[in-house]
Image (tube, rainbow, N blue to C red):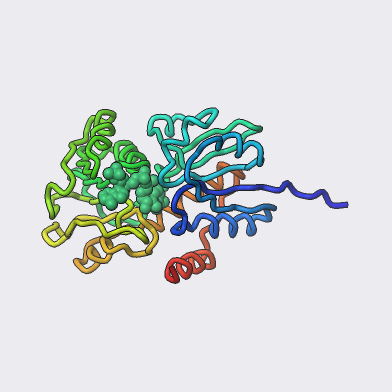
């Protein structure tokens, strides 16, 4: 008799989760890799006893998204070096009953840059937002030796907190300028532009056309910010790139397998987003 393969329960913790494409993607990859199990969306109002619940239900692993990337940390048994530095976890692995936290947004963001033809790294980069994803991006920008980073967030205290950890950051007040120029790249890491949220109240009208616009929001596929950049013939990177790359890394941590981003899954995700 053939031995039954292990049943894997995986999922994503966050609120809201309507925008998340992680379930469709990971279930597709599990199927393609002949892994038995499900990846489920877990829309949570709070994290009370979450560690006990994960262990009791014997989850293989989880992703963590807004607004829990930082608040999840105190429930974990251990976090890896990058996640510790960032104080943000987006992936949990259940290793024999011990919950280990990782951050794959850093690598996801960096891999999102792979198709760029030119990028003047000597000019400053503007990062908008100071949540869980923002710091992962700032950490990556420092790793790739960006000399100056401007950081703007609605809650200035959060930006200042990040500013204390990295040498090359200059904090600017939220919407201090209603236009931006002389940056090599502008990165939106806020939830603004995401389905159900207002658009980012920043105009690119006066922005240098050589500026690259990177919006990490991936639902919708083209945020109003990306649409404006495209209208201005600026180079853009859409959040879907980063999303797929960070997901590949998470899948690798859970299963030690490297899934493929094939045309079928791209079509499924794009269709689902377009229908929302
Ligand atoms: P988070 O920790 O909750 O941070 C949210 C950020 O958005 C904060 O900077 C927050 O500002 C800002 N924000 C929210 N509502 C706002 C409003 N009405 N006006 C001004 N600012 C507002 O979330 P996160 O984990 O960093 O994720 C942020 C976004 O990135 C989400 O859309 C998420 O889906 C996306 N994301 C994409 C990827 C990808 O792989 N493509 C990966 C990670 C995240 P305050 O500090 O003032 O609240």
Left or right? Give the position of 124 relative to 82: left
Q: Residue at x 48, y 37 (%)?
A: 102
Residue 42, how many percent across, how many down?
54, 50
Residue 75, how many percent across, how many down?
51, 32
Q: Residue furthest right?
A: 1
Residue 147, how many percent across, how many down?
21, 37
Left or right? Give the position of 46 relative to 220: right
Left or right? Give the position of 6 relative to 66: right
Left or right? Give the position of 150 relative to 139: left
Viewer-closest of 259 and 227: 227
Viewer-closest of 21 and 214: 21
Q: Residue at x 35, y 53 (%)?
A: 216
Q: Is residue 189 at all visible to an observer of this figure?
A: no
Q: Residue at x 54, y 53 (%)?
A: 41
Location of residue 98 by image quarter: top right
Residue 31, how many percent across, how many down?
64, 58
Location of residue 70 by image quarter: top left
Q: Quadrant of the C terminus?
A: bottom left
């Amino acid at each position: 008799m053939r031995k039954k393969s292990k049943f894997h329960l995986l999922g994503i913790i966050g609120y809201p989760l309507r925008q998340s494409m992680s379930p469709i993607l990971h279930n597709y990859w599990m199927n393609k890799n002949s892994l038995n199990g499900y990846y489920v969306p877990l829309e949570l109002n709070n994290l009370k006893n979450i560690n006990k619940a994960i262990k009791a239900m014997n989850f293989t692993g989880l992703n963590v998204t807004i607004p829990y990337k930082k608040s999840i940390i105190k429930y974990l048994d251990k976090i890896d070096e990058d996640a510790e530095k960032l104080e943000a976890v987006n992936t949990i692995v259940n290793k024999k009953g011990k919950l280990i936290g990782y951050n794959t947004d850093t690598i996801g963001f960096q891999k999102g840059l792979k198709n760029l033809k030119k990028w003047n790294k000597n000019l400053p980069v503007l990062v908008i937002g100071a949540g869980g994803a923002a710091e992962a991006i700032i950490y990556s920008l420092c790793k790739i030796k960006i000399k100056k980073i401007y950081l703007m967030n609605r809650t200035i205290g959060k930006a200042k907190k990040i500013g204390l950890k990295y040498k090359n950051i200059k904090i600017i007040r939220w919407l201090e300028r209603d236009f931006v120029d002389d940056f090599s790249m502008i990165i939106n890491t806020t939830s603004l532009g995401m389905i159900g949220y207002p658009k980012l109240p920043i105009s690119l009208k006066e922005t240098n056309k050589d500026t690259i616009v990177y919006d990490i929001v991936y639902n919708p596929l083209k945020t109003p910010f990306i649409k404006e950049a495209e209208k201005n013939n600026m180079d853009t990177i859409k959040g879907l790139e980063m999303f797929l790359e960070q997901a590949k890394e998470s899948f690798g941590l859970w299963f030690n397998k490297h899934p493929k981003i094939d045309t079928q899954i791209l079509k499924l995700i794009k269709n689902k987003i377009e229908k929302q």
